[in-house]
Image (tube, grey):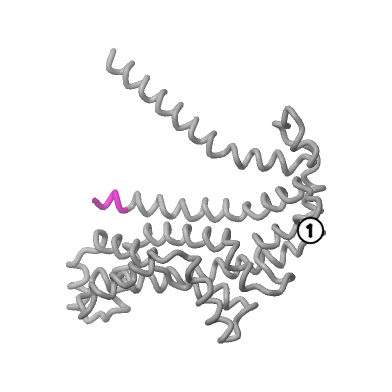
Amino acid sequence: MRAETAARSRTIVGHAVLLLGVLITIFPFYWMFVMASNTTGDIFAYPPELVPGPHLWENMNKVFDGIDFWGSMGITVVAATSVTFLVLLFDSLAAFAFAKYDFPGRRVLFWIVLATFMIPMQLALVPQFVTLAWLGWVGSLKALIIPGAANAFGIFWMRQYAQGAIADELIQASRVDGAGFFRQWWTVGLPVLRPGLAFLGIFTFFHIWNDYLWPLIVMTDPGKVTLQVAVQQLNGVYTTDQSMVIAGALMSVIPLIGVFLIGSRHFIANLAAGAMKF
């Protein structure tokens, strides 16, 4: 009886801690919604407004009047989706080769890839911009997509995942059946790598969607920019309507919530399937 009471108490405490964590996580989004639905005067009032106001649609209409919201949304969706697809393709191919193929110079090449991971992004801005300017890609979607088509973090993450998840016996059996590299990657590697790919896909999509500095540099036409840069354009030179800007920020993160919910469901489902196999 005492053991059941103690177990029930631990369960209640655990649920209370989880609930507190959920509330702390959700509060910034709720606070953003509160500020977006009030006026700028209400935001800076004391005590601050803690409940949503009636000005959400008014602030959203100001955003639509101030910037080409749907145009910037389209550019951001195309860039984030394209980069995510290319990263999953190239990084999984490279990781599969590094993890399951023994070829001359494999270790040296992998350490060179890791070394590029250590270079701060700011140091690569100028060489990348000069290269894109030489190619004539500045101001186009190619400047947003191609430089991010593969990255060292994704190769490292998927290589570590592939080493533990893909059994060597499966690779050897596929080779006996006459499968080449790409068939092994497609039929043996990808089904096992789905949880890792789901995480890498969510991480990459969020990174590209929220990136501000690189699109600000390469998208030279003020009418054709990504969503983060467009929201920044809502700031005035002398005065800023803070509630309008926050409404724009709120509108820009809503698609990310949907992507996270879809991607996390696949991530958790595949992890559960993998756990059942063990």
Magenta run includes residue 153: no
Magenta run includes residue 276: yes
- Image quarter where the N terminus lies is top left
Residue 14 picture location, percent across and down: 40, 28
Categorize mark 1 by other alpha carbons within 10 Å: few (<14), some (14-19), many (20+): few
SS for dot 1:
helix
Q: Is residue 105 left or right of residue 153?
A: left
Per the rendered image, the range of residues in magenta is 274-278
Q: Closer to the camera, 124 or 30?
A: 124
* Vertical arrangement, residue 44 with respect to residue 163, above or below: above
Amino acid at circle 1: Phe
* Vertical arrangement, residue 234 with respect to residue 177, above or below: above
Residue at horizontal 25%, vertical 74%? 108
Q: Closer to the camera, 83 or 238?
A: 238
Q: Closer to the camera, 205 or 169?
A: 205
Q: Is most of the magenta stretch helix, strand or loop?
A: helix
Q: Closer to the camera, 123 or 87?
A: 123
Residue 82 picture location, percent across and down: 53, 71
Residue 170 occupies quadrant: bottom left
* Vertical arrangement, residue 65 with respect to residue 242, above or below: below
The residue that label 1 is drawn on is 64
Residue 69 occupies quadrant: bottom right
Residue 74 picture location, percent across and down: 66, 67
